[in-house]
Amino acid sequence: MNKLSKKSSIKAGLPPGTLIHVGKKKSENVKISVLDFNDEIFDAVEVKNEIDCSVYKDPTTVSWINVDGLHNIDLMRSLGDQFELHNLLLEDILNTNHRPAAEEYDDRIFLTLKMLGVSKSGKSIVSEQVSFVLGSDWLLSFQEKEGDLFDSVRNRLKEAKGNIRKNGADYLLYALVDTIVDNYFFVSEYFSEKIEAVEEVVLTGADHTTVHEIQRLKKLLIDFRKSISPLREAVSALQRDNSVLISQNTRRYLRDVYEHLIQVSDSIESHRDLLASIMDLYLSGESNKMNKTMQVLTIIATIFIPMTFVAGIYGMNFDHMPELHWEYGYHAAWGVMLVILVIMVIFFRRKRWL
Amino acid sequence: MNKLSKKSSIKAGLPPGTLIHVGKKKSENVKISVLDFNDEIFDAVEVKNEIDCSVYKDPTTVSWINVDGLHNIDLMRSLGDQFELHNLLLEDILNTNHRPAAEEYDDRIFLTLKMLGVSKSGKSIVSEQVSFVLGSDWLLSFQEKEGDLFDSVRNRLKEAKGNIRKNGADYLLYALVDTIVDNYFFVSEYFSEKIEAVEEVVLTGADHTTVHEIQRLKKLLIDFRKSISPLREAVSALQRDNSVLISQNTRRYLRDVYEHLIQVSDSIESHRDLLASIMDLYLSGESNKMNKTMQVLTIIATIFIPMTFVAGIYGMNFDHMPELHWEYGYHAAWGVMLVILVIMVIFFRRKRWL
Amino acid sequence: MNKLSKKSSIKAGLPPGTLIHVGKKKSENVKISVLDFNDEIFDAVEVKNEIDCSVYKDPTTVSWINVDGLHNIDLMRSLGDQFELHNLLLEDILNTNHRPAAEEYDDRIFLTLKMLGVSKSGKSIVSEQVSFVLGSDWLLSFQEKEGDLFDSVRNRLKEAKGNIRKNGADYLLYALVDTIVDNYFFVSEYFSEKIEAVEEVVLTGADHTTVHEIQRLKKLLIDFRKSISPLREAVSALQRDNSVLISQNTRRYLRDVYEHLIQVSDSIESHRDLLASIMDLYLSGESNKMNKTMQVLTIIATIFIPMTFVAGIYGMNFDHMPELHWEYGYHAAWGVMLVILVIMVIFFRRKRWL
Amino acid sequence: MNKLSKKSSIKAGLPPGTLIHVGKKKSENVKISVLDFNDEIFDAVEVKNEIDCSVYKDPTTVSWINVDGLHNIDLMRSLGDQFELHNLLLEDILNTNHRPAAEEYDDRIFLTLKMLGVSKSGKSIVSEQVSFVLGSDWLLSFQEKEGDLFDSVRNRLKEAKGNIRKNGADYLLYALVDTIVDNYFFVSEYFSEKIEAVEEVVLTGADHTTVHEIQRLKKLLIDFRKSISPLREAVSALQRDNSVLISQNTRRYLRDVYEHLIQVSDSIESHRDLLASIMDLYLSGESNKMNKTMQVLTIIATIFIPMTFVAGIYGMNFDHMPELHWEYGYHAAWGVMLVILVIMVIFFRRKRWL
Amino acid sequence: MNKLSKKSSIKAGLPPGTLIHVGKKKSENVKISVLDFNDEIFDAVEVKNEIDCSVYKDPTTVSWINVDGLHNIDLMRSLGDQFELHNLLLEDILNTNHRPAAEEYDDRIFLTLKMLGVSKSGKSIVSEQVSFVLGSDWLLSFQEKEGDLFDSVRNRLKEAKGNIRKNGADYLLYALVDTIVDNYFFVSEYFSEKIEAVEEVVLTGADHTTVHEIQRLKKLLIDFRKSISPLREAVSALQRDNSVLISQNTRRYLRDVYEHLIQVSDSIESHRDLLASIMDLYLSGESNKMNKTMQVLTIIATIFIPMTFVAGIYGMNFDHMPELHWEYGYHAAWGVMLVILVIMVIFFRRKRWL
C-alpha cells in the first residue's frame, strides 16, 4: 500500500506532462528489444538507449517494442514523438505508482497494470509496473527492469505456435496480459497455502506471532486487491468499448482474461473472510486459554486457602485452646481439612472444571 | 475455496486455447452416453473414447451427448471439431476450477456450474463441475466422473413423463440444471441442521471444539456461496438474453430456476448472519464463564485471607502478647474471624455474587 | 429461517410442474368460500373440495374465491384447469416455502407473500403463506389453513363500506394485501417492545439469559426480514409494471402499501442496529463486572498478603530472634502492619479503586 | 425509533383512506392561520376549527394556510374537499408516524418531513411532523402543535424581505423546508458536542455510565438518520421531477436544500463512525485497566507468597530442625527472603511491570 | 468533522442568498491579485478591497482574479454583480463549511474544494476552503487567507512554461485544481508514515497511548475522506458534463485529476482497513499480555500455596502430633514439599507455560 501512494507527491507543483520517473530505479540499464513479425517473417533486434522506429510502423508486420527500465527520459520523449503519444500518457508510464487502468488516447490504447509475484523469501509480494501502448500495428511495452514473464510469448512468436503470428498487435497485447494474469493465480495460491497453514496453527495451538502472520497476510491481501480490482474494470472496459484497435476475435479472448480476474477477485474476498474468521478463532482460543488458566488458579486456591486457614487456627499460641490438648485433635484437624477438600472437589466436579 | 483457486496456475505461460485438464482426475474411464429422442423416438447408445456425432446433428431429433471424465484430450478435441466449438470453450470445459458462468459462443450456449452434495462423512461439501454446450438440436454435457443426479431426467425421457420429449434441447438443458439446483436445497438444509445443532450446543454449554465447528461451517458457506452467486447471475443472463437457442417457454422455466437460486442465496446470507451471532453468543458465554470463575476465586480468597491473617497474628511468638493469656482469647479470635466472615458474606450478597 | 429452506428439497428430481404440497399440513379440511359481488349484488357461497367456477368468470361481477388448505391436489388441478393457470404457478402456490414474489403469467398476476403474526406465547413469529392469482374480474386466494385477517375486508364487502364494491378485482387484491401489510406493524411493534425491554435489562443488570433473548430476537428479525424484503420488491414491481390487470387508481394504493413496506424495512434495520449495540452494551457491562471483581480480589489480597507475611515472620521458631523478646515487639509488629495497610489504602485511593 | 413504528398498527383492518389521527395528541386546540399575499398585498387571518377557503384559490395571490393540531378530523375532511385532496393524502397527513416523503397526487405535491430539535433537557431529540400540500397558488401546511420555526419566514413575508413575496407558492414551500433543514444543523452540532465530550471522558478515564451515554447517542443517531435519509431522496425527487408546480428557479434553491441534507447525512455517518471508534477506545481502556489490576495483584502475590512460605517453614514445630538453633538462622531466613524479593523485582522489571 | 458541521447553523432562519461569512476569520486583510494573460501578454496587478473588473472580461486575454480573505461582504457583492453571479453561488463561496462540489449556474461553473495539508505540529490536518468560478475567459478563485500552493502555477504563467498560456481559463482551473490534488498525496503519505509507525509500536509492544494515536488517525482519516469523496464525484461530473466552458482537451486533463483522486480514495480505504487491523492486533496483544500475567500468577500461587499448606500443618501446636517428634520429620516435610513442586512443574511443562 505504501509503495503505491508514496512519492507520488514529488510531482506536486510541476506542470502536467512533465516527464519524471516516479518510483525506485530498479535497473541500471535501459534495454530495448524489438520483435517484428507477421505470418511469415520473424525478426528480433535488441538496442540500447536510442532507436529509430519509423520502420516499425510498416503496416505489413506487427512490431512489439519492449523497453526495460524507465529512467531514460530522453528515450521516452523520443519514443513519444515517434509514436505520437500524448504527454499525459508518457507521464503515466513513468509513474510506477499508477493505478491499473486502461484509457484510449486519440487512436492509441494505453493499459497499465502490475506484474505480481511472490518474493523469494516468501514474505512479500513483489510488484512491477508494466505499461502497454497499442497502435494499429505495433505494441509498446514498458517494464521497470529486465527479466519478465514474457519469454513464453516470445517462444510462441519465434516458433509460430498457436495462431499468435496470424493475429495483430491487439492479440499480442492480449497474450501478454493473459500471461500476467495467469501469474496472479500463483499469488492467489500463495495466500491459500499461507492461510491454510495459519489456520492449522490456530486450530492446534497458536502463540502471539501467529497474529503477526495474520496481520502480514491481511496487509498483503489489501495490496493484492488494490492491484486487481482496478485492472478488472480496465479489462472489462477494453472488452466492451468499441475501439477499432481491438478486433472482435480478441475481445472474446479479453473476456476470458476478465473472467480470470473475477475469479482472482473472488478468491481475494474469500481469503479476507477466512482471515477474519481465523482471527476470531485465535481470539476465542486466547479467551479459552485464559479461562483454563483461571480455573487452575481458582481450583488450587479454593482448595488450599481454607485448609491453610484451619492449619493457621491451630498454629495460634493462645494459652487456652482446648482442642490442642485433645488426644485426637490433630487427627480431627486433618479430618476437617479432608472434608473441605472433598466439598471443594465435588463443587468443581459439578462445575465440570475437574 | 482452495480447490477453486488451486492449480489454475499450471496453465500460466501456455498459449490460450491449449487443452489441458485442470483439476484432479476423478475417474479412470471416459464414458460417453447418447440419448437421441423426439416425441416418438427414444434411442440410447453408450460408447467409450470415440464417437462419430454427425448423425446426432439431425434436426428431427434432440440428441443429448453426455461425457463422464474429462481427461481424454483427443476425444475432447474431436468433439470440439465435430460440433464446431471454440477453443476457449473447450479450455473452459477442461478447467474444473472454472467459475459458474454462461456464455454465448457463436451460436452455441456454454454453461458451466457445480454439482454439490454433502459428503458421506457429513464433514464437507463435495463438488463436481458440470458443463453444458447447447446447440440448436443437441446438448453436450461434461462431468468429471460417472454417477450423477440425472437419472430422474433419463427416466422421464425414457418414459416420456411430463412434456420433456415434446420440447427441444433447451428444455432438456433446463431440466438438467433444475435437477442440479434442486439438490442445492439439500446442501442448504445440511447447513440449517448443523447450525441449529451448533446453536443448541452453544446455548447449553459449549467447549472450544464448538468454535472449530463454527469455523468449519463458515468455510463451507464461503465455498457454497462461491458456487451459487455467479450461477445466479449466469442463469439470469440466460433467461434475459435473446438468444434464438432458448425458447420463450423455456425462459419461463429458467426464471423458476433463478428464483430457486435466489432462495438458496438468501439462505446462505441468513446462515452467515446466524453463524456470526452464534459466535457472539459463544464468546459472551466464555466471558460469562470467566466472570463466574473469578467470582468463586474472589469469594473464597476474600473470606479466608483476612481470617488467616487473624490466625497468623496469634501464631506469632512474641514474649509479650497479652491476648494470648486471656482466658477467652481463643474464643475472641474466633469471634473476630466470624465477624469478618459475616461482613464478607453480606458484601457478596449485596453484589449478588452469592 | 429453517422453515423457509427446509424440505424444499423433497421436490428434487421431479419433473417441473409436478404438484406436491411442500410444507406442514396445517389443516385437515379444505374449505372454499366464494364472494361474488358488484356495486349492487353481494353473494356468498361456501363449498368443500369441489367447485364449478365457470359461473364466476362472468365479467359483470367480481368473484373472490378463497381456498383454505392446500393439500387437496385434485382440487388445485381442477382450479388450475378452470382458470387456465400455468403449471409452474400451481406448483408455486403449493410450495409454502416460496419466497414472496410477484409474477405475470400470461394474463394472470401471481403474488405470494407471508401472513405474519406474533405467536400466542410471544416467543416466535408465526408465518402462513398466502398466494393470490388475479384475473380480469376474479381473484383467487390460497391459504394454508382456515382463519385469517380478511374478515374486516369481508365485512367491508358485505356492508359496502368505502368504495371496495365499486372497484374491480385488482382493488380487492390491494385491500387484502394492505390488510396483511398493516399486520406487519404489529410484528414490528413486538420487536420494539422486546428490544426496549432487553435494553432496560442490560442497562440495569443483565445475566447470561439476556444474551439468549438477544439471540432469539436476532433470529426472529432475520426471519422477518426474509419475508419483507422480497415482498417490497414484488409490490414495487406490481405498482410500476404496466399490466392491464391493475388500474391506475389501484396502482396509487399499491404505492401506499409499498411505502408501508419501506417503513417496516427501515424499522427492521433500526432494530438490527439496536440489537447489535445492546449486545455491545452487554459485553462492556460484563467486562466492567470482571474489572470490579478483580479489583475486589486485588484490594483484599494486596492488603492482607503482606500483613500476613509479617505475622508469618514472627511465627518462626528460631532460637535467636531478638524482636520476640522486646517488650513492645508485639506492638511494633502491629505498627508495621498498620503502615502497610495505610500505604495500600492510599495506593488504591490514588487508583480510584476505593 | 419506537415512536415511528409504534401505533401505526392501530389502523390495521380499516379501509384505506379512513381518517384517523395516528400519534399522540400534542395540542388541545386546533389553530388555522392564513397568510394571503402577493408582491403588493399582505393579509393575515387567524381562525379556529372552521374555514371557507374558496377565496384563497384566487390565482392573483399566494395563500399559505397553516394548520396547528391534527385531531379535528372534520376540519381535515373539509379542507380535503375544498382543495380536492386525495383520501390517501389526507390519511398520510394524519399519520404522524409517516416516513418523510414527497409524492405527486394529481396536480398537488405532497411533502411530509420531521421538524427536529434538541429537547430542553438536552437528553433527547424532539420530533414533530410537518406536512405540506402544494397547489398552483396555495400552500397548505400541517403541524402537530402550535409554535414552530416559521416565524422568520412570516417576518420576511410581512416585511417583504428578499424576494419571497415576488415568488410563488413553490418558493414559499422551499423557504419553509429550508428553515426546517437549517435547524437540522443544530441537531448535528448537538451530536458533535456530545460526542466530543464523551470522547474526552473516554480518553481521560471513563466509567460504565459512559457506555450508557454512547448507547444513548447511538440510538438518537439512528432516529436522526431515519428522519434525514428518506427526506434527502424526497427533496432530490422534487428537484428533478418535472412537475409544473415547481418553477426552474425554485428547483435551483431546492438543490441547495438537497446539498444541505447531504452534508447532514455525511455528518451522521461520521458521527456513527466516531461513536463506534469511541466504543472501541473505551473497551480497550477497560482491557488495559484489567491488565493493570492483574499486574498489581500478580506482583504482590508473587513477591509475598514465596516469602511467606519461607516464614512458614521456620514456623514448623519439628523437634529436629537444625536451622532453628543456628545463631544466625533468623538472619539467614531474612537473607533468603530478600534474595527472593530481589529476583522477583528483577523479573518484573524485565517484564516492564515495574 | 466538527469544523465542517459546526456553525452552519448560524444561518438558520435567514433568507436564502443572505451573504454571511460562515467560519473562522483566518485573515485580517483581504487581498485581490489579478493575472491577465494570453500567449503574448502577461500582466500582474494587486489591489485591496475594491476592484473594477470590467476590463478583465475582455475575451482576448484570460484573467485570473484571486481573492484572499472572505470577510469583506461588500467586495463579494460587488464581484457578484460584475460577474453576474447567482446569490446562492456567492453564499456558497462564503460558507467555508461547504462540501466539495461542482455546479453549473447559468453559464458559470462553480467548484469548491478543500486545500489540505499537515499542520506544522504533525498532529492534525489543516484545511482551507478554495472556491472557483469559471467564466468564458476569466477565472475567479477565493481563499480564506493569503499564502497558497499556487506559486508554482504563477511561475509557469510568468515564464510561459508548458502550454499554460496557450490555453484558456478552463485549463488554468485544471492546473490549479491539479496542484491542490497533488498535495493530497502529501497528506496520504503522512498517513502511510504514521500508520506504519503505529503498527511498528503495536508489533513490538504498545501501551495505552498507542490506542489514542490510532483513534486520532481514525478521526483524521474520517475528515480526509469527507473532503475527498465528494470532490471525486464533482470532478467526474465536470469531466463528463458537456458544458461549453470546458474544452475537450481540458477534459482529458481533468480525467487525470480524477484518476489521482481515485488513487487517494483507494489509499484512504486501505488506511482504514489497516487501522482496523492494527487495532485488532493491539487488542490481541493486550489479551496475550493478560494471559501471560495470569500464567505467572497461577504458576507462583499453584506451586507455593500447597507447599505453604504443608508448612502450616506442622506449625500447628497440637500436643499429639507424632510427625513432629520423628527424627527425620523435618526432612520428610521438605520431601513432601519438593514432590509437590516437581508435580506442579511437570504439570505446567505439559501446559507449555514453562
Image (cartoon, coloured by chain):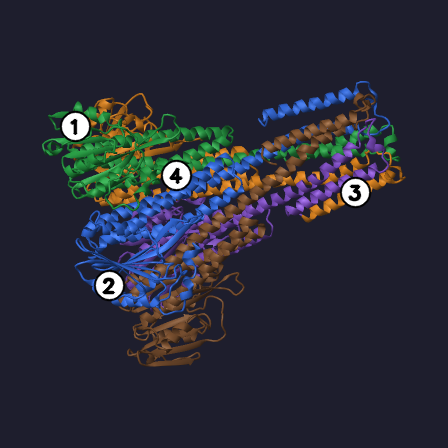
Chain colours: A purple, B brown, C blue, D green, E orange
Residue A249: in sight, yes or no? no
Q: Are marks 4 and 2 on the same chain?
A: no
Dot 2 amino acid type: Asp
Name the mark nearer the viewer: 1 or 3: 1
Q: Which residue is mark 3?
A: E338
Disc 4: which chain? Answer: E
Label 1 packing within 10 angstroms: few (<14), some (14-19), many (20+):
many
Q: Are marks 1 and 3 in contact (CB under 8 Å)?
A: no
Which residue in the protein does label 4 denote? Answer: E185
Amino acid type, residue under disc 3 in the picture: Leu
Dot placed on the residue nearer the N-terminal end, 4 or 3: 4
Do dots 3 and 2 share one subunit?
no
Q: Which mark is residue C106?
A: 2
Expressed as whole percent of the image width and height from the top left, the position of residue C189 reads 38, 42
Q: Horizontal and vertical percent for residue B125?
A: 49, 62
Label 3 SS: helix
The chain to which mark 1 is attached is D
The local crowd at label 2, few if under 14, some if 14 to 19, many if 20 or more residues have their Cα within 10 Å, is: few
Q: Is residue B143 above or below residue C43?
A: below
> Disc 4 to disc 3, how far (Cα)?
66 Å
